[in-house]
Image: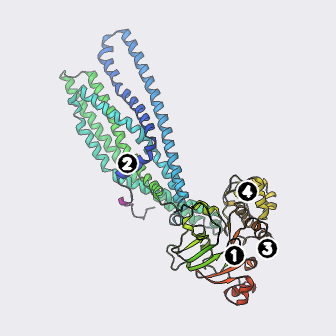
Amino acid sequence: MADSSPPSSPTTSESEPAALARLWTLLRPYRWRIAGLSLLISVTAAMSAASPQFVRVALDDVIPSGDGQRFLWFGVAFAAFYLVQVLLQYAGMYQSFAFTQSVISDVRMQAYRRLLRLPVPHFAEERSGSLTSRVVNDVNALEGMIQAGATRLAGQLFSIVVVAVILAVMNWRLALVNLVVMPLVALVTRHYQVPLRQAAREIRRRVGEMNAVSTEAVGNIQIVKSFVAERQEEARFETENDAYVDKNLDRRKDVGYMEGLVTFVANLGIGALLIIGGWMVVGGTLSVGELTAFVLYQRQLQRPVISVMFFNNQLQAGMAALDRVSELLDAEPEATGSLASIPDGDLVFERVVFAYPGAERPALDRLDLRIEQGRTAALVGSSGSGKSTVTRLMGRFHDPDEGRVTLGGVDLRDFDLGALRHAIAVVPQEPALFSGSVAENIGYGDPDATRERIEEAARLANAREFIEALSQGYETPLGERGVKLSGGQKQRVAIARAILKRARILVLDEATSSLDSESEAIIQDALSGLFARSSGLTSLVIAHRLSTIEAADVIHVLEDGRRVESGTHLDLLSRGGRYSTLWELQHTGEGVSA
C-alpha cells in the first residue's frame, strides 16, 4: 500500500554539526571510558596492521631458508601473536557492548523522566503510543550508532592511519593508488547521506505510528469488540505497516546502491595494485612477498575505510532516532514554582478564563469561586459547564489564560508542583488503576504505607468486604487498568487510594456515580464524618446525582463556565433558579446530567 503522506522535510531534523553536538552531550559523561575503550581497540587494530608481515617474512625469508628451527620459532610467534589478538578483540567487544548498554539505559531513563514531566496538553498533541515509541524504540535505535561510533570507529580510524603510513613506507608509488580510490569512496558516501537520514527519520516516525495505533486498539479492546471493529483496526494497522515496509524498502535501495558502488570502487583499487605491482615485480623492483603483503595491507586499509563509510548508514539511522529523542528531551517540562510549604486558607478562583486548545469558546469564563478551608463544597451544572475543568486547574494540569487560582492567598503557580499535588487527592469519574495488587494500588501515593493504613483506607471507602472476598485478598493482582474488578469496585479502590494519601483537599469528580446507593451512603458518611473531622479536610464534590450533595456546606451552580448560583441545598431550592430546575428534572425522571 503506497504511502500518501508527504516526505519529511530536511528542516525537521538537526543539522549534522548540531546532531553530533547533541550526541557528544550524551556521551560526554563517559569520555574517560570511551578513551580507555578506544585505546584497547586501537592496540588490537595495530596488531592487525602487523599481521601481513608474517606473510612477507614467510615468503621472503622462512620458506626460502629451509631451516627447521626458523619454521618452529615462526610457528610459535604466529600462534602467540594471534592468541593475544583474539583475547584483546574479545575484551574490546565485550567492553564496548557493556558501555553501549550503559549509555542507552541512561538515555532511556532521561527520556522517560522527561516524558513523565511533560505538561498534560502535550499528551493531547501526540498519541501515547508514539510518545512511548520515542522512549523505547527510538532510544534502542541509537545502540548501533553509539557502539560503532564511540568505540569501534576510533580503532578503525587508528587502523587507517597506521596502515596508510606502512603502505607509504613500503612503496610510496603503489600507495598513490589510494589518492584516487579513497576520495571516490568518500564522494559516493557523501552523496547518499541526506536521503538516508531523511528515510531513517520517516521510518522512526512510522514505527511510532504503528505503536500508537496498536496501543490505542489494545487499550480500548472492549470498545473494539463491542462494535465488532476488529477488521477496522486491522485496516488501520495495515496502512501503517505497509507504509513502514515501503519506507524500509526505499531506504534499503539507497543503502544497496551506496554499498555496491563503494565495494566496486575498492575492488578497482585492488585491481590497479595487481597490475601496477605485477609490472614492478616483472621489472625486479618489487618482490612477490612485498606485493602480497602490500595487497593484504590494501585490504586491511579498505576494510576500515569502507566500514567508516558504511558507518554513515548507521550514523544517519541513529541521527534520525536521535532527532526524535532530542525533541522529547528538549520539550519544556511542566512549569513549577519554588514554594514547598502549602499554607492554610481558602481555594479561590479569581476572574479565571481558560479555553482548551482549538475550542470555540472558553471552558471557564471569568469564573469567581471560593472553596472555604475545612468545608465541603459541591459543583453542579449541565454537561460542559466547566465543573471538571475547575479540578484540572486546581491540580495545575492546566493554568488559567487569564485571572488566577490561589490557595491561602498564594497563586498556585508559585508552589512547587510536587508539594501542591501532594496536598490534593482526586478521585475521577473513571478510576485509573494499575496492574499491581489491590494493596499496591491503594498505597500508590504512599509506597511506604503500612498494611494497617491500607486496610483502614479500604474500610473507610467501603471496599474491605469485597477485597477480602477476592482470591488473594489485598495481594490479588488487578490486571491492566483493573480489568478484574467491576466499575463500582474500581471506584472504591480509587477512593481508598485518595483517603490513604491524607491530602488536605479531596476532590470527588463524580466519583460515586458507579456505586449503589448503600455503598455511596457509607462512603459519604466516612468522608464527611470521621475522616473529615480528624483532618480538617477541604472537600470538593462534583456529583451526577444531586441527592448525594444535599449535605454539602455550599453548592455552586455553574453554567457556560460561570458561577450562576451559590448556597445550601435548601436555599437554592427556595430560590427557584437553575439548581431548582435541575433538581426537579432529576426527580421527575427526565434525566438531565448534572
Mark 2 in CB contact with mark 4 (< 8 angstroms): no
Task: Please tell me how crowded label 2 is: few (under 14), some (14-19), or many (20+) other residues with Cα within 10 Å.
Answer: many
Nearer the camera: disc 1 or disc 4: 1
Is residue 77 placed above or below 40 in the rendered structure?
above
Comes first in the chain, label 1 or label 4 = 1
* Mark pair 1, 3: CA separation: 21 Å
**SS at mark 4?**
helix
Residue 399 x %, y %: 54, 70
Q: In the rendered structure, which disc, 1 or 2, sits on the residue that comes first in sequence?
A: 2
Nearest to the observer: residue 353 or residue 516: 353
Task: Tell me: 455 left or right of 68.
Answer: right
Question: As rendered, which of 194 and 345 lies closer to the eye?
Answer: 345
Residue labelled with disc 1: 377
Marks 1 and 2 close (CB-CB < 8 Å): no
Distance of label 1 from label 2 (alpha carbons): 66 Å
Task: Report which residue position mark 2 lands on.
Answer: 255
Residue that badge 4 annotates: 438
- At x 38%, y 51%, the residue is 19
Query: Are the two marked residues, 2 and 3, in contact with CB atoms closer than 8 angstroms?
Result: no
Mark on residue 327?
none
Inspect the magenta stretch and tell me whether residue 144 lies in it.
no
Disc 3 residue type? Ser
Q: Position of residue 338 (x, y in %)?
A: 54, 60
Secondary structure type for disc 2: helix
Region rendered in magenta: 1-11
Residue at the image position 38 percent from the left and 9 percent from the top: 69
Q: Quadrant of the C terminus?
A: bottom right
